[in-house]
Image (spheres, rainbow, N blue to C red):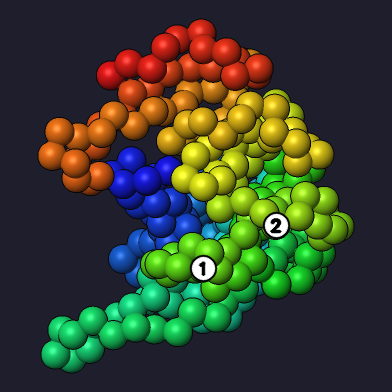
């Protein structure tokens, strides 16, 4: 995923991670984040800038103590431990003279169960929620948002016991849906199965999740001026074998 398209997805991801809860003007009040009620018995709340979880009666089950948490998925919730503020997540801040200053990034991600116990200790520089029994995790400083050296990061997949079932080897990875996950290698995206084998070779500039046996993919159309930022993308749809059911078009 590159250029303007990747920037759009990154912006969306940032919004999800950093703005997961809707704050009220009174920072001491509790605000319930949007969530499909059937996905968990618990609901994410925020108090004084810290996030935790309540049950359907409004009782606090997991005290607000995390700067960044995700909703529960398959019984586990992704949480960030350490300095997980907006500034450290971005990797920079502005000083009193409005000069951009780099901020050290050292936070880690792990997973808690619905009692608040860590089932998978915070050990990953980045991670995504569980889907179909597996979660994408990233190792290396390059996993942190804003880091330019992408050679310092690799994505793999863990199971619910924290065991690495697909070794870190991809430049990017998404959640499993319908037995397949989009992963990036060398700037191109394809789809792997749960053994880590490519079922659809990495030929696309981006790939989204399968739904009903089909997935949207993009192919980049170079710009006339040769500037990669001005490149345009064509959207198409493939089936689980990689066959186009709709050729890429704009």
Query: What residue is rendered at 30% in x and 80% in y?
Result: 93
| Residue 139 in view, yes or no | yes
Residue 124 in picture, x, y percent from top left: 66, 68
Query: What residue is rendered at 48% in x and 23% in y?
Result: 216
Judged left or right of residue 224, residue 146 is: right
Question: Spatial distance from mark 1 to mark 2, Cα to Cα?
Answer: 13 Å
Q: Nearer the viewer, residue 207 or 65?
A: 207
- Per the image, label 2 sits on a secondary structure element best described as strand
Judged left or right of residue 132, residue 93 is: left
Residue 64 in picture, x, y percent from top left: 59, 71
Judged left or right of residue 64, residue 40 is: right
Mark drawn on residue 163: none
Tag 1 and tag 2, C-beta contact below 8 Å: no
Mark drawn on residue 142: 1
* Image vertical order of residue 217 relative to residue 152, above or below: above
Snapshot quadrant of residue 219: top left
Residue 180 in picture, x, y percent from top left: 69, 31
- Per the image, label 1 sits on a secondary structure element best described as helix
The residue carrying pointer 2 sits among few (fewer than 14), some (14 to 19) or many (20 or more) residues within 10 Å by Cα, namely: many
Most distant residue in the top direction: 245
* Image vertical order of residue 21 relative to residue 87, above or below: above
Earlier sequence position, callout 1 versus callout 2: 1
Residue 165 in picture, x, y percent from top left: 82, 51
Query: What residue is rendered at 45% in x and 68% in y?
Result: 149
Q: The N terminus lies in which quarter of the figure?
A: top left
Q: The C terminus lies in which quarter of the figure?
A: top left
Q: Nearer the viewer, residue 149 or 99?
A: 149
Q: How many marks?
A: 2
The residue carrying pointer 1 sits among few (fewer than 14), some (14 to 19) or many (20 or more) residues within 10 Å by Cα, namely: some
| Residue 79 in view, yes or no | no
Q: Which residue is mark 2?
A: 168
Query: What residue is rendered at 19% in x and 45% in y?
Result: 227
């Amino acid at each position: 995923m590159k250029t303007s398209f990747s920037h759009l997805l990154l912006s969306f991801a940032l919004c999800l991670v950093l703005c997961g809860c809707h704050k009220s003007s009174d920072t001491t009040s509790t605000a319930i984040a949007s969530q499909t009620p059937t996905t968990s018995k618990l609901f994410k709340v925020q108090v004084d800038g810290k996030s935790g979880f309540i049950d359907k009666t409004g009782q606090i089950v997991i005290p607000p103590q995390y700067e960044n948490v995700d909703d529960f998925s398959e019984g586990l919730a992704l949480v960030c431990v350490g300095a997980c503020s907006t500034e450290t997540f971005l990797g920079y801040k502005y000083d009193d003279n409005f000069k951009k200053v780099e901020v050290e990034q050292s936070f880690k991600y792990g997973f808690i169960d619905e009692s608040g116990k860590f089932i998978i200790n915070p050990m990953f520089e980045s991670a995504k929620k569980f889907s179909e029994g597996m979660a994408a995790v990233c190792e290396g400083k390059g996993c942190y948002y804003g880091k330019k050296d992408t050679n310092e990061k690799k994505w793999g997949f863990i199971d619910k016991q924290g065991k690495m079932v697909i070794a870190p080897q991809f430049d990017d990875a998404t959640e499993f849906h319908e037995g397949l996950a989009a992963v990036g290698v060398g700037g191109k995206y394809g789809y792997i199965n749960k053994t880590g084998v490519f079922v659809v070779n990495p030929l696309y500039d981006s790939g989204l999740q399968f739904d009903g046996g089909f997935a949207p993919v993009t192919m980049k159309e170079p710009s006339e001026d040769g500037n990669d930022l001005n490149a345009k993308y064509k959207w198409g749809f493939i089936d689980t074998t990689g066959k186009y059911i709709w050729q890429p078009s704009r």
